[in-house]
Each structure stands twice: as C-alpha cells, then as structure tokens.
Amino acid sequence: MEKEILNDLRNLLVLQRRRLHCAACRTVSDMKKNEGKLSDPLDRAVVEFDRQMELSMRGRETSALRDIQRALDRIDQGIFGVCDLCGRPISEKRLLARPTTMLCVHCQHQQETISGKRTYRSFEDEQRAIC
C-alpha cells in the first residue's frame, strides 16, 4: 500500500479516535452535571432511561475505539492490510471503506457463514464491489 494512503488512513483513524474520546468525556461531564435530585418518579425514570441509552451508545463506541487502536497498532507494526487468517493482502478498496478491518473479503465471508451472520449481499456481489 502506498505510504500516502497509509498516512491518510492513519490520520483518519486518529481523528475518529479523538472524536470518540471527546464524546465519552462529554457524556461523563453531562451526567455529572445532571445528577440533580428529581422529586418526580416519572422524571427520574426518563433521566435514567436517557442515561442507559447514552451508556449503551458509549459501549459500542468503546468497541470501535479498540478496533481503531488495533488498526493503528497494525500500521505501526507494518502488518496493516494483511488478513489475520490467511495472510493475503486486503484490498485497498476494502481498507478505504473500513480501515479497521483485519480480514480479507473471503475470510470475512467464511467467518460470517460459520457464525450465521451473513449480510444481505452475496459473496460474489461483495467481491465485485470491493475488488
């Protein structure tokens, strides 16, 4: 992969990581600010529901942060763009679409077939779109 594209992907990943960290900090700050005592049980229930939804979103973002860090580590180690399972190069189009991916299309398809998580696209459609 060209160094320029690799640097662009690194910058994109660093920016995404920074945005997710800022969102997490804002959430904690907002929750601390809004810890006032509400006397109405319905108001408390609404606030608690909103907090649970926010924490659920932050949980997904925590997973995204781990994926981003793994991708950055792979760039640093010089193994970015190499499939974890088969060792073949991952197509540049796939990496541009999803820089945190660690599997080529073929291995991803096999993983989804094994786990029963097949997407709406057929494997052949996916290959045509990415390759």
Image (spheres, helix red, strand yellow):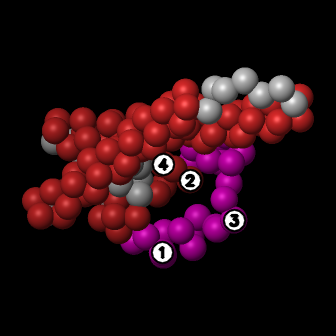
Q: Is residue 107 visible?
A: yes
Name the one closer to the observer, 12 or 112.
Answer: 12
| Residue 34, x across and y down, in percent | 62, 32
Give me the residue at 22% from left, 54% from top: 11
Q: What residue is rendered at 53% in x and 68% in y?
A: 126
**How far apart are the two marked residues, 4 and 2, measured between alpha carbons?**
5 Å
Which label was assigned to residue 44?
none
**Would you say the magenta stretch is mainly helix, strand or loop?**
helix
The local secondary structure at tag 1 comes to helix
Does the magenta-highlighted stretch encompass residue 115? yes
Residue occupied by mark 1: 129
Q: Earlier in the sequence, mark 3 or mark 1?
A: 3
In the structure shown, which secondary structural element does the residue marked by tag 3 occupy? loop
Mark 2 highlights which residue?
Answer: 109
Q: Dot 1: few (<14), some (14–19), or many (≥20) neighbours within 10 Å?
A: few
Is 105 placed above or below 58 here?
below
The residue carrying mark 3 is: 120
88 and 19: which is toward the camera: 19
Residue 109 vertical placement versus 40 (above, below): below
Magenta stretch: give its range: 110-131
**Rounded to the nearest whole Å, what is the CA distance between mark 1 and mark 2?**
14 Å
Residue 11 position (above or below residue 35): below
Name the residue type under label 3: Tyr
For disc 4, the neighbor class at 10 Å (few under 14, some 14 to 19, many from 20) is some
Dot placed on the residue nearer the N-terminal end, 3 or 2: 2
Mark toward the start of the polypeptide (4 vs 1): 4
